[in-house]
Amino acid sequence: MEAEALFRQQCTTAINEDGSANAQRLMDLVVETYRLQAGKKRDAEDRSELLNRQNGELKSALAITTGDLAEQKRLFEIVLDNLPNGLSVFDSEQRLIVCNIRFLQLFGFTADDIPPRVSMASLIAKIRGTERSETKASRLPNAAANGHIRHREWNMDDGRTIRSVITVLPDGSNISVHADITEDRKAAERIAYLAHHDPLTGLPNRIRLRECIDTALAGRKPDEHIALVHLNLDRFKSINNMLGVSAGDKILRQVAERIRMSAGAGNVLARLGSDEFAILQSGRQQPWNVTALAEQIRRELSEPFFRGDKAVELSVSMGIAISPQDGAETDVLLKHAGVALSHAKSGGGNSEHFFTAEMEAQIEARIALEADLRKAIEREEFELHYQPLYDFSQQRICGFEALVRWNHPTRGKVPPMEFIPLAEEVGLVVDIGRWVLRRACRDAAQWPDDIKVAVNVSAIQFTNSDLPSDVAAALTAAGLPAGRMEVEITESVLMENLDEALPVLHSLKQSGIRIAMDDFGTGYSSLSYLRRFPFDKIKIDKSFVNGIVENKEAFAIMRAIILLGDALGMRVTVEGVETAEQMALLEREACDEIQGYHISPPRPAIDVPCLIAQSAGQTSAKAS
Ligand code: C2E
Ligand code: CA
Ligand code: CA
């Protein structure tokens, strides 16, 4: 500190040749201000390092000082010009009395630009000539003990940003430190950009969308409506699986571009997640504007996307909520658009739904059902019922299909069609499926050796669990040979993830388990999937049985499917047989097996021995 005090004194003398009374105080402030501002910019460690270095420089400078004023002035200038930032001192008349080289460099001034006591106004005019715009940053009143500090930013023509920290003294003179903050600013801008944008598409992200909704709702005029469209691509996961993630990303970019073109510049388009987008549309003409927008998007996305020579077809589901009627707050509007989207999805996708209050009630009911479903396994609320499979060649029951039942303490018996799709959606079907496998094997182990058990397996069990090892564990635990088990899958298993499902199916088949294609004929392309895997059996869906006795066309279709199965060497089971006439007709048509209420509805496990005994009794009665 002693050295610093001495330095100040020396400096004062050096520039005091004009006798200015202000000089002493100004020099104090140069040093003080520089220290203060350097301290503001750096953290404590950097600051003390800087001060130490400066003190060191000062000490060595002063050590060789001889008292020669000219020499001292030279030293002072060396110190000034070696400061890492620009420094300028203007007197109370706003005329420059001290500056360093860095100051000149930062603002691009030449020596000619700086005649003695040049005015601040003329320097600013020069800067303005090369400056794009000037941004006055925050004013910090009384930040310094004997004055106040102002911040100012200069956006230079060459793209640099210079920040000035100006300490204004009570008499109007000021001392400023100037720094090039271009890199800091760019980094900060990049961070801010990344925090608010999706890197894949460059679209605003969820955070930014929320901000835009906040702003739109806050500025909404009484007769204005704000529509929020929540979009989700249908079955995009299977496209990703089919083409790979990087091709999937490219398609997503194209999707974003097509939606962006439909949305137009006046609306905000954001990407919320993998295949989820949202559009914020303001306007008076709602719901007409948003309906037209949704139609436009649907049209744009219905054109195929190309990956090389592969054409990919996409469809989209949309949920729409309109403020103020569907919500005056951002959270509520977002939630309601999401609710409407879930509705569009659960209806099979490829549609748009406007939010209604009933939808919310249904969603709440679903959430409650899901919560109950999560507890159902540990509370042992599931039960298996068994429905017989009747074999024409043996004229008796040859196996049973296990069908899960949920006995809820207050809801009563919840049918599988109400909870299996939900369990699939939330992944709970993996645990339920594991329980079904174990229980079915355990029950079947009690039956005669020639009676099989068929178990339904969902697509999710192929992707989200190790199905072969779950099946093997269930068989081993029950001591049931693999040959007595049949696994029923629907085409969705192959449709959603063929590459992953095929090896699993082959591995199951190799272990001796039979594989059946369930609900044959109800899907999109059951026929093409028959070529992908050597199924042991096809189960013709019950919808094909209706009318086979009375209606020639229905009969012709049934006959054709039976012949097809036969030609492919697969057993054919017809489901949903409810009458003796249907049974007789199917027997004549060389169908292998039937299942349906005519033989028996699904019954609790305890009834199985009785069903088997009855069937055996009827067979022997027929034989004798
Ligand atoms: P599914 O595999 O096609 O099962 C046959 C369904 O048809 C059963 O309905 C059965 O009760 C019904 N059914 C049987 N015979 C007749 C008939 O003559 N006429 C009519 N109209 N219907 C008949 P359920 O038990 O309600 O099961 C419905 C669906 O739930 C099943 O269809 C299957 O897709 C699913 N499911 C049942 N249990 C399980 C399971 O353990 N795991 C999985 N993943 N899905 C299951
Ligand atoms: Ca089935
Ligand atoms: Ca079926």
Image (cartoon, helix red, strand yellow):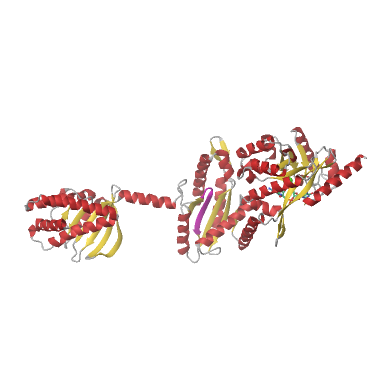
Q: Quadrant of residue 501?
A: top right
Along the viewing direction, whichever of 315 and 32 lies nearer the viewer? 32
Above or below — where is 183 with respect to 362?
A: above
Q: Quadrant of the C terminus?
A: top right
Q: Give the answer, above or below, for where 548 lies relative to 366.
A: above
Q: Position of residue 374 (x, y in %)?
A: 63, 55
Q: Is residue 281 magenta?
A: yes
Image coords of residue 481 (percent x, y): 73, 39
Quarter holding residue 337: bottom right
- Residue visible at 16% across and 52% down in the picture: 58
217 on left or right of 611: left
- Comparing 222 with 501, the one in front is 501
Q: How many marks?
A: 0
Front-lying residue, 406 or 25: 406
Q: Give the percent coordinates (x, y) of residue 95.
A: 16, 58
Q: Is residue 163 left or right of residue 461?
A: left
| Residue range corresponding to the magenta coloring | 273-282
Q: Is residue 520 magenta?
A: no
Is 358 drawn above or below residue 456 in the view shown?
below
Residue 156: % across, % down: 28, 50
